Amino acid sequence: MDITPEHLVGLFPAPTPQDSKYTRGVVGLITGTQEYPGAGILSASAAASCGAGYVRYSGPPEARMALLMNHPEIVLSARPGQRIDAWVVGSGFPGLFRTETSEDKDRGADVISILSSLDDMDSFAVVDAGALEAFAVADFEARNCARCVITPHQGEVERLLHLLGDELPAHYPQQNRTATALYLAQKLGCTVVFKGARTVVAGADGTMFTCPEATHWLATAGSGDVLAGIMGAMIALNAAKLQDKPEMLSQVAAAAVCVHSLAAGMVSEDIYSMHEWLHSHESDDFDDDEDDFEDSDEDAEFSKQISELRRLMGIPEIPDKTDASVSLGQGSEDIPESSDAEASDMPDGELTEGHQIILMDLIRALPHAMLILRYTGDDIMDTLNPQNPDEFGQFGGVGGYPGFPFRFGGPLQ
Ligand SMILES: NC(=O)C1=CN([C@@H]2O[C@H](COP(=O)(O)OP(=O)(O)OC[C@H]3O[C@@H](n4cnc5c(N)ncnc54)[C@H](OP(=O)(O)O)[C@@H]3O)[C@@H](O)[C@H]2O)[C@@H](O)CC1
Ligand SMILES: Nc1ncnc2c1ncn2[C@@H]1O[C@H](COP(=O)(O)OP(=O)(O)O)[C@@H](O)[C@H]1O
């Protein structure tokens, strides 16, 4: 099935008086090596910026130093046996056993130890890049795989299938990425995020999610490392729910893919597909039940938060929450007038109350994800903001997409 905006609802719970840094999700990362320290910085920054309550990191000295400078809230130790809700392992590892320094080799061994004890520790893991090799290690016990999300790109899928001793299907890969993801998920008993322009997510139970096609500006080194960190944070934030409903793991993974690509769309201002995605799914469930929106302190607080977040992000205010709907792209003087020919191609969406809830969750998630993409920054931003705006895709451009309510800018400008 296609992942819809509704699948994101509730995955970014706001902190409550009962919360502590531990209940907000503890992420542990073993990412980055001497050769690829940047992968450690990207993934750990992503986890810290994406709302996790506590981030612990183990990686090479260069990455530790950079993280300390930019994210002093990150604790520089992550070891087997620690109480971690979601691990992110392997980004920046050329292979678990092919790293150069003895420190990196020790951390490769830690990864195996961690993946072998996920059940005992009630933890989940995002297994990226070099750590995918763990699935080919004979003594790595399959009983833990249900707690793993693996995030291979096409080259890694091929390598993993090879390590598992499988022949590639004749029609592989382009024609049947979905079937390949499902095959791997069922063979390994884990969730598979098969990355690409249109990422597909398969759960071991046969659940499939197809994510909207992401902006192609994501095709740049390091963007997968950012995704791993976002995913780790989202799994940690929802760890309590996942303990009760482990079958939601594939949904949370797919939601992380969406947040990553929506944020990339906003940062690159290639937001046409995002607009289309947000408004291609009506949320009738919410509209049917007026009681959902009865006046209460909670609703008032909810509306206040929406207003504040809208203000921060430069999203125009909705004049009246009880108003039936507000036409997107025409509701505020703050929105630049459409002037380009493409503007007439924009779907004329309606912002219903159901959409407000969805937007609320997106609004919570996106500033963080955008911050990561900006911070990760000089490389990615150079790619995303080339000197010559004419080089942007059809719907991109330095001015953003006219008429779209999310404006480039806000506090991150
Ligand atoms: N600044 C940092 O710290 C960075 C750290 N990084 C981190 O380090 C890890 C190693 O990264 P990496 O770039 O060395 O190797 P990796 O992506 O595994 O490719 C290996 C081979 O696989 C193939 N292949 C790759 N992609 C493919 C595709 N889509 N479709 C098809 N084939 C594809 C291709 O083989 P070829 O086709 O050329 O034979 C390629 O030579 C990486 O996973 C990441 O976590 C990176 O993010 C970079 C920035
Ligand atoms: N052409 C593309 N269009 C949209 N998204 C892409 C495209 N190419 C790659 N991506 C996305 O960018 C990320 C790249 O991750 P990955 O291949 O692991 O690169 P890296 O290892 O350099 O971080 C993935 O999330 C993938 O879905």
Image (cartoon, rainbow, N blue to C red):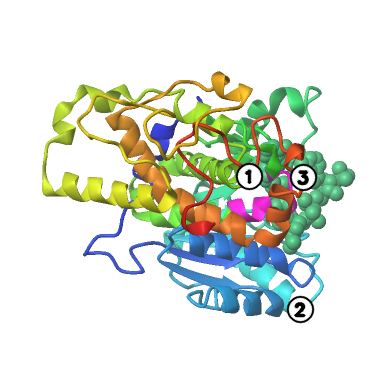
In x, y percent, where is residue 357? 31, 38
Compared to residue 282, the image places residue 125 above or below, namely below
**Residue at x 40% of width, y 62% of height:** 25
On whether residue 220 falls in the magenta region, the answer is yes
Mark 1 lies on residue: 268
**Residue at x 12% of width, y 49% of height:** 297
In the image, the residue with mark 3 has its CB under 8 Å from the nearest atom of ligand 2: no
In x, y percent, where is residue 336? 49, 36
Query: How far apart, in angstroms, are the residues tagged by discs 2 and 1?
Result: 39 Å
The amino acid type, in three-letter code, at marker 3 is Asn
Q: Earlier in the sequence, mark 3 or mark 2?
A: 2
Residue 113 in view, yes or no: yes
The secondary element bearing badge 1 is classed as helix
Mark 2 lies on residue: 102
In x, y percent, where is residue 128? 65, 53
Query: How far apart, in angstroms, are the residues tagged by discs 3 and 2?
Result: 45 Å
The amino acid type, in three-letter code, at marker 2 is Ser
Mark 3 lies on residue: 388
Q: Nearer the viewer, mark 3 or mark 2?
A: 3
Q: Earlier in the sequence, mark 1 or mark 3?
A: 1
Q: Quadrant of ligand 2?
A: top right
Q: How many marks?
A: 3
